[in-house]
Amino acid sequence: MNVLNGMRCLLAAADRGSLSGAAAQIGVSQPAMSQTISGLEAHFGATLIVRGHRGISLTNAGEVVLEHGRRMLGELESARAQLDGLQNVISGKVRVTTVQALAQSYVGNAMLELQKMHPKLRAELISTDEVVDIEAENIDFAIRVGSPGHGGGIVRRIGEVESVFVASPGYLAEAGYPNHPDDLSRLNYVQYREDRKVGDILCKGPGGDLTIHIEPGFLAQQPSLPMRLRWG
């Protein structure tokens, strides 16, 4: 029984919540994943997981083994990184999360270049507009737009993201062209992602800053979708 491999499978199953998700993460078949965890249970002489319709859950024994397994695998990763450091080689795994728009436009290419520079480094990009719990999801680095979220870690402001109002000529012909900033409040807006703070938007213009109140009428949770919609 390869105990370390069993620990990796148990860790993946606990993180993903299912054997199928764990198998996809590691790159094995689900029967192989199930067999490996069964072997780990035989090795320790205890039931480690309970299978159900909604996935798997850990038993008390499974929680104990998982806690030690995380430490063991973490120590092995640390040892590998230190050994590679002696050879000036960067290895291991780095997990980065950011919003979909940045992942598609900038961060994805940057992660590819990073992996090319360091072939032994496993780079994983999690693209989501949700505020991910970086501790629970074992995230090393998060690039966020707006609220930094909750949890530990160091937060730094790295820049500003500017956006503009756009509308199709057809919609403006029907709704009326705005002649004054106050006219913008009566228009319908397509909102890119869910944000409870949306309502008052700070706008910059040649006459100075002003705040415009908007009422989003449609939520499009995909970066490219708002640009393809025809509202009017």
Image (cartoon, rainbow, N blue to C red):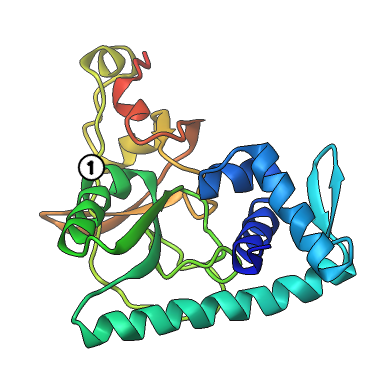
Image quarter of residue 101:
top left
Which three-letter amino acid code belongs to the residue tagged 1? Val
Residue that protrudes farthest toward the left in the picture: 206
Pick the front one: 193 or 139: 139
Q: For the point 52% across and 58% down, which residue is it?
A: 131
Q: For the point 71% across and 76% down, which residue is it?
A: 67
The percent coordinates of residue 18 (x first, y second) are 71, 46
For residue 30, say whether it is visible. yes
Residue that protrudes farthest toward the front in the picture: 1
Q: Total of numbered circles in the picture? A: 1
The percent coordinates of residue 33 (x first, y second) are 66, 46
Q: Mark 1: give few (<14), some (14-19) or many (20+) Cα within 10 Å.
A: few
Does residue 214 lie above or below 81 as drawn? above
**Quarter of the image with the N terminus in it:** bottom right
Pick the front one: 88 or 58: 88
Q: Secondary structure at mark 1?
A: loop
Does residue 149 lie above or below 130 as drawn? below
Q: On the picture, is 218 further left or further right than 203?
A: right
Q: On the picture, is 203 further left or further right than 76?
A: left
Pick the front one: 124 or 12: 12
The percent coordinates of residue 113 (x first, y second) are 17, 55
Q: For the point 62% across and 56% down, which residue is it?
A: 12
For residue 18, say whether it is visible. no
Image quarter of residue 161:
bottom left
Pick the front one: 192 or 47: 47
The percent coordinates of residue 31 (x first, y second) are 69, 38
**Quarter of the image with the C terminus in it:** top left
Q: Which residue is mark 1?
A: 164
